[in-house]
Amino acid sequence: MSNLLIMEDTGRLKKSFTNGDIYVGNFEGELPHGKGKYIWLDGTVYEGDWEEGKMTGKGYIVWPSGAKYEGDFSGGYLDGFGTFTGHDGSVYRGNWRMNIRHGLGRKEYPNSDIYDGSWKEGVHEGSGRYSWNSGNIYIGSWKDGKMSGRGVMKWMNGDIYDGSWLNGYRHGSGVYMFADGGHYSGTWSKGLKDGKGKFYPAGSKHPSLRRMCSNLGYDDNTKGLPSQGSSINSEGSETSKPRVKRSLSERISVGGLLRSSGRISHRTSSLDGNWSQRHPSVKSISNDFSSKLLHDSDESQSDVPDGSPVVYEREYMQGVLMKETVRNYTEQTRKGKPRNKHSVKEVKKKSCVDIFEGHRSYYLMLNLQLGIRYTVGKITPVPMREVRSSDFGDRARIRMYFPRKGSQFTPPHNSIDFSWKDYCPMVFRNLREMFKLDAAEYMMSICGDDGLRERSSPGKSGSIFYLSHDDRFFIKTLKKTELKSFHYDGNYGSVDAEKGLYSFSIFRSWVLLRMLHEYYIHVKKHENTLITKFFGLHRITLRGGRKVRFVVMGNMFCTELRIHRSYDLKGSTVGRCTDKDKIKENTTLKDLDLSFEFQMDKLLREYLFKQISIDCEFLESQQIIDYSLLLGLHFRAPEHLKALLELPTTATNSDSLPRTDGIIGSQGELIIPPKGLLLVTHEPSFVSTAPGPHIRGSTLRAFSVGDKEVDLLIPGTGRFKVQLGVNMPAQANHKLLDNECDSNEVELFEVYDVVLYMGIIDILQEYNVKKKIEHAFKSLQFDPQLISVVEPKFYASRFINFLKKKFPEQP
């Protein structure tokens, strides 16, 4: 209410409000409308356009603190395009939505840092360029205000990193180029080198950057990270391997180059997916930057002397150099040619993509997402009930036709016409509920805008593999000829151990339908079961009646920890080793390749083998063979070697988040915990509750902490809930052979702290007539007790006994 309304000499009305505010301008009725000036009691002043009592249109506002904004308003909010100048001297010019930076924009910070790119809900998200006042530059992807995704970082001293980032750290695959010409291509975890990589010293011959990026396999879907990680000074590591003189690039601490390049968390705004089309200047800067990197790297090869053909093959654990092999570049190039040739041939092989007559499997992915979205949306509103006998079998299904133009029941879409069939929808709905998967989260994980990433086929089947964007779910499709019998060729060579991809290698859809009732009862009764978790079984029918079936499963290696080694263990020995020349970074190894024995807490081991026996008894009752234990190992670097790790520098950017990795004390001292892995009493409020395929399952008890429920504490990393097959701590012991140690008088062992991830996979192969014939045939060539194909009872017994030898009971 106003207490005064007068006409000014300018012809405008002036209105004073009882709260002390004043408005001078045009009205429509009793509301400001048109041009006007509003003065709040606290001194804030707005002058500009009004519409029905709200600031709408062009305007200018000044706050008592000295901050000001000039630009678009809508409904009383900063909304549209405008320039904001903060009281601290920062300037943002770009898009706004309801008082929040959202869209394309450029911000100049008080310390002269500049961000130019996409914003979302007030933080950097999308593509953008950040320039530090020190001269460091990052161009690439952002998420939640931090460098995440693919990006390029250039330091003022000339060093460059091109690769993946996550939460402000280098994370995933990438190439680090030193200013003196040295290159390192490999993988990182939270800013530290972690896994295998290759170092090419300055002056040595090395592949072009383009080829290294291709070999690492990262693309637009690759997850990445940047920021203040650190590397070890290799000269400080002891090794018996041959040595050559190090270049300058190897002696420089990466951490020392990261000043002013810490994790950024400006609560500001972001850019949408089409930012490059609407903001060509940023795109051209990024393209020029990347093009220069590629040009410089390719051009440098002409200047490389032939006398320095040295390549270092290295393996790191959390920044600590563990192994190093010096190779001749010419030898390595020659060694790699056959694999490259084979790889090209693999790309040309026929697969399910052929069903689309030349169209990309992208359309199949759209069909999967449309079908799952429809099925989950249809079955979720149905009141929860216990399953009935009628819910099982081939006749328990949901069918729907999805024409491209849409129908009364289906939306229009950009894929091809297809028919959808969902098997046993009520059963799988209850299984998802049993595994504590929220229906909305399940749909968003698989059917969201970033839903699925296609992976290459690990075998000869030519099947298409998908992984959900959050790594929680793994999907495998089958060709028409594989619908009834998918043969596993024994090759897991292209399994992605970091992301936990594994081949669902023996698939008979009718086997799963036949045993689904017993499977349902088993997993309901045993919440700690190690058997593969199935979340859906579906079929797509395409033009001409061609069909593709696929299954949705939980990813057993869904973890933030890097999986350094993975093994597929069956308990047999015939043909169960991997050709050393074919072992790559992500190769899943076999029984005879496992040289470690694992020491576990007494109670943890007891829980483990009790459940393995129960699961094997179930598979035996279903006449199943050929199943495997998929075992993933995350190694922790020995603590005494971490003293060699150079300290990561603290970012000087005032807007950066401080490091919270637990390695650096408040006074900057290096903290070395007594052990790499610690079992501590379980505290639910301190462990991650993020949803995933491992959320179901009880917390285990450990003998070492007095038979209490425990968490796994990894100093410098985090605290994790210990479940059966998930986050299980152990010590991996490896006996050194005579050629691996200097002394023959004593037995020497390598001992590592490891975190174990495991599950029983490939559970759909029956011991049928075909397998009985195969057993008889192979028994003529090999010892019948050592071959993989044996009758179910003996298979289960041999499987358990093999694992007990690898996990011996402590005296």
Image (spheres, grey):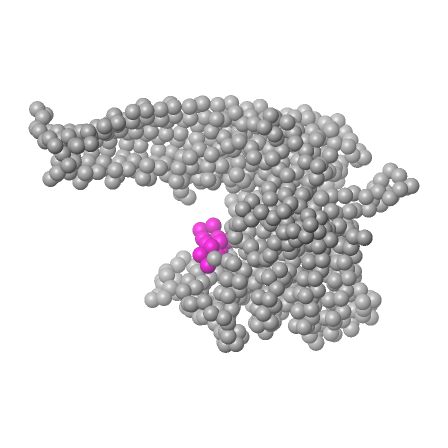
Q: With 373 as the anchor, is 694 left or right in this view?
A: right
Name the residue located 49 percent from the left edge and 65 percent from the top edge: 429
Give the main secondary structure, helix, strand or loop, of the magenta stretch. Answer: helix
- Is 80 magenta? The answer is no
Residue 307 at least partly seen:
no
Name the residue located 40 percent from the left edge and 65 percent from the top edge: 381
Q: With 51 as the anchor, is 550 left or right in this view?
A: right
Q: Which of 552 and 751 lies nearest the eye of the viewer?
A: 751
Q: Which of 411 and 287 lies nearest the eye of the viewer?
A: 411
Q: With 761 as the anchor, is 245 left or right in this view?
A: right
Q: Which of 711 and 657 lies nearest the eye of the viewer?
A: 711
Question: Can you give x and y, in whole percent of width and height, for residue 683 in the image?
Answer: 58, 47
Question: Can you give x and y, in whole percent of width and height, for residue 511 in the image?
Answer: 61, 71
Name the residue located 24 percent from the left edge and 33 percent from the top edge: 58
Name the residue located 52 percent from the left edge and 52 percent from the top edge: 691
Residue 259 at least partly seen:
yes
Q: Which residues are magenta?
A: 439-452
Question: Can you give x and y, in whole percent of width and height, for residue 749 in the image?
Answer: 81, 43
Q: Quadrant of residue 635?
A: top right
Give the quarter of the figure containing the N terminus. top left
